[in-house]
Image (cartoon, rainbow, N blue to C red):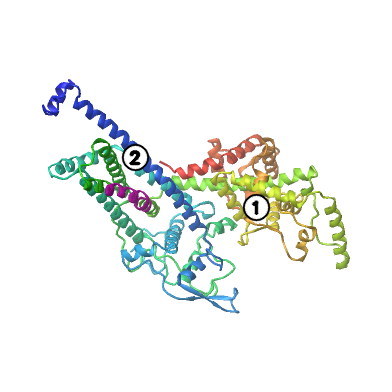
Amino acid sequence: IVDSLAARVFSAEELADPHENPLFETFELVHMMIFLLLIVLLFQAAALLPMSHRAVEKWRRFERTTTWGQKQGTLETLFVQAGYISRKACPSSNRGVELMFSKPFTYGCNWWERAVMRQSGLIRMIMWRAVRHEFLWPGAVSEAVDPKAHPKHKKAAKLNPSFFSFEGYLRGLLSNTVVALVEVDMITWGLTLLFLMPLTYSLVSFSLSIEFLQCIIAWLLLAAAAGLAICLEEDLYAMTPALPNDARRILRLFSGTCMQDFQRVITPRGEDPCHFDSLGAPGLGTPRDAQIAELSPTDENQTSEVFFSCETYRRILRLVAFWQAICVTSLVVSFLSHPFARPSSVILHLLAWAEWPLMLFVVWPMLVRKLTMRYSLDDSKDWGLIRHVSLHHKEGLLRHHLRLMQVWAYFNRAFEAQEPWANVPTPSPAKATQKGESRTVRRKSSAKSWARATFQKADAERNFRHGLQLFQGLGDPEQEELWELFELLDTDGDESVGVDEIVGKFKAMGLKDKPETAARSVLRLVEYSGIQSYLKVEHGHTPSFTWEKFQSMIALTTTHRPEKELEEDMTKIFNLIDKDHPDLVTVFEITEWMRGIKRSLTEADVATVLHKHFCEAKPTLTREEFVDWFQAIAAAGEEAEEATHAGHH
């Protein structure tokens, strides 16, 4: 059968050698080509991983960039540096500075100008925040916009931004986009055969070298991908809500909408997403006097038409990626199968290879990022992924308070064991009538207690270094959650957590036993301070954790703890919640406790988290079930984060 098939396919000259069967050689060549094709596809997927991480880090920075302030990195400072606004000294202002209009803010008047301007990190950030704003508050358009002319801009169900991360949602969409580049389905194979086979046979009739054809096809693929990126860019521009031309009004629009601001608020602001911080709106009068800027669906330069749908983009992107892999495979096979006939063939071969890095590291990252953002602007949102991201953040809130309980319990055990760092005086108001006498008495008593302590500066420095090592050994998801906890505790946004802020959180959780001593002691664990420095609170100074000190402290007190201690800490939380029924807590009691710590988890939120673990409705929990539930939440931190990254395929 094989010989008969070979006789029909090959000529007599090709079958003249009795030792070599061209049909077998063809099968071996095809087998090698398919194997190389799979290797190239895997390499392309691996090359996209670093790009994905960089995109996620950039989105996380966009979501956490604060609005006001003269510090580096705030939106206000970025606008000043870009020349859109300027700062003018104004003693009568509540900040001592007034923001003055310098030049209008635009995305560009044509596609080339927009492409150039979008190389600026500020432009990309503002567009990203505008898309996020529209995603969180759909239909938040100006009153001048006719709702009949823009029917898609209707008041829709709003997400609770305190428990939702747009960056986390994009991560799930990003994974789907990356899969589109490496997944080859039957439709892709069919379209490839339908298009490439006629093209191949038509090119064979021309007297062109294989190297020339490979070079032409490779660069045509790059041109097609670049054209697709331009189409996506214009689609994003057409669908991105328009912003005011005055950068000060943009600042007012985004005021209080960064992720950490949502973490700090007690409850969501309902219909008003544009709440303001205590700094007011410099340059525009007070927040209540000036008109609040809103998003508009388009400006005069934007159109409502788009080139392709998201699924069409995805299909084209998959075809281009597969054809790129075929092109690279053909380059490898041609290099291994026959030598180059002349120097020009070598040059053409190298030119064909030069296209691949450009496609891989320049064009594809743009395509993946833009298509991911395009999906987020689509009318059909992935509500399954939205629920998944929201659920992860609700579980993260519970993990935050479990860690705070671990911090308090770590101190309490050390206090009972009479460890030196945990047995220190706590400043308290004097009861004596004469201030001089009360201060003297307090200082003498504190000095005696301090003299008995054996905890020295070298001990604190050793603990500090060890804590940082423990923190660096944690995975990225857990480090990110600890940063979120730091931001949650940093209620005044000064990039430090005061001891009084931790004391307030301890008291809100119901930990009434020595909260001031606990907070001051865990700071002393990683930062040695003398008696005068320790008691500076009497003179209006409150000791505080920097981010680095907080890393060390939280790692020392919460990581690599014995399982028995963790169970005891969870039982303590159960006892704080359980007030009415012995050894039994209800969903309503858990919700009431969460309200006590000034977080707005509803009964439905708590029930959803419980249902995820028990796979059934659980209106009440026993002590054992509660501990089991919290253990699952604690253990699922990193797994849930990775699942969020992976998304829903």
Kindly indicate the quadrant of the structure image that contains residue 135.
Answer: bottom left
Query: x, y (%) of residue 146?
Result: 36, 66
Q: Gap between marks 2 and 1, in whole Å? A: 45 Å
Q: Residues within 10 Å of mark 1 (few under 14, many from 20)?
A: many
Kindly indicate the quadrant of the structure image that contains residue 98.
Answer: bottom right
The amino acid sitting under disc 2 is: Val
Query: x, y (%) of residue 232?
Result: 33, 55
- The residue under the point 79% across, 55% down is 426
- The residue under the point 45% across, 46% down is 385
Considering depth in this image, is 331 or 104 the residue closer to the camera? 331
Image quadrant occupied by the C terminus: top left
Q: Is 64 placed left or right of 216 in the picture?
A: right
Q: Is 243 placed left or right of 539 in the picture?
A: left
Give the overall secondary structure of the magenta segment.
Answer: helix
Image disc number at residue 386:
none
Region of the chain picked out in magenta, as a range: 350-366
Task: Decide if residue 597 is in sight here.
Answer: no
Residue 562 falls within the magenta-colored stretch = no
Callout 2 secondary element: helix
Image disc number at residue 40:
2
Dot 1 corresponds to which residue?
550
Considering depth in this image, is 637 or 383 the residue closer to the camera? 637
Relative height, residue 31 to residue 634 (above, below): above
